[in-house]
Image: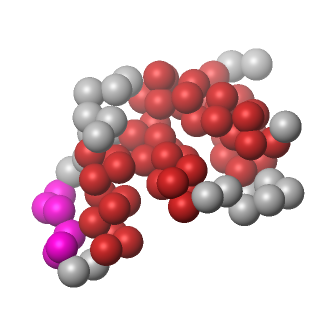
Amino acid sequence: MELNQAFEQAVADSKNLSERPSNETLLQLYSLYKQATEGDVNGEAPSMFDFVAKAKYEAWSSLQGKSKEAAQQEYISLVQKLKS
């Protein structure tokens, strides 16, 4: 299966997991998804008082420089692990 197709399938699968992942895992999924679909983080960091947005921004920012393909592959692997 082509990487983009596998990624799209993993995105669909992530919405139907039997258990809700931990917040840390959800952040990891979010940041990998953003890196895979948009590339490096852009825009200004959210206010330090917006804890959720700040955590998401920092998680995505930590992947700076990772290729979209590598982010897709990591996302697919993480979803596969969560499904088992």
Percent position of residue 48, x then y = 18, 73
Percent position of residue 5, x then y = 69, 30
Percent position of residue 40, x then y = 27, 39
Q: How many marks?
A: 0
Q: Nearer the viewer, residue 16 or 51?
A: 51
- Residue 18 is drawn in which quadrant? bottom right
What residue appears at the point 70 percent right and 29 percent down from the top-left corner? 6
Q: In this view, does 20 lie above or below 63?
A: below
- Residue 15 is drawn in which quadrant? bottom right
> Was residue 38 drawn as part of the magenta stretch in this picture?
no
Q: Is residue 57 above or below residue 48?
A: above
Q: Is residue 14 left or right of residue 48?
A: right
Q: In this view, does 79 lie above or below 49?
A: above
What residue appears at the point 72 percent right and 62 percent down from the top-left corner? 20
Q: Nearer the viewer, residue 34 or 26?
A: 26
- Residue 37 is drawn in which quadrant? top left
Main SS of residues in magenta: loop
Q: Quadrant of the N terminus?
A: top right
Q: Is residue 32 left or right of residue 18?
A: left
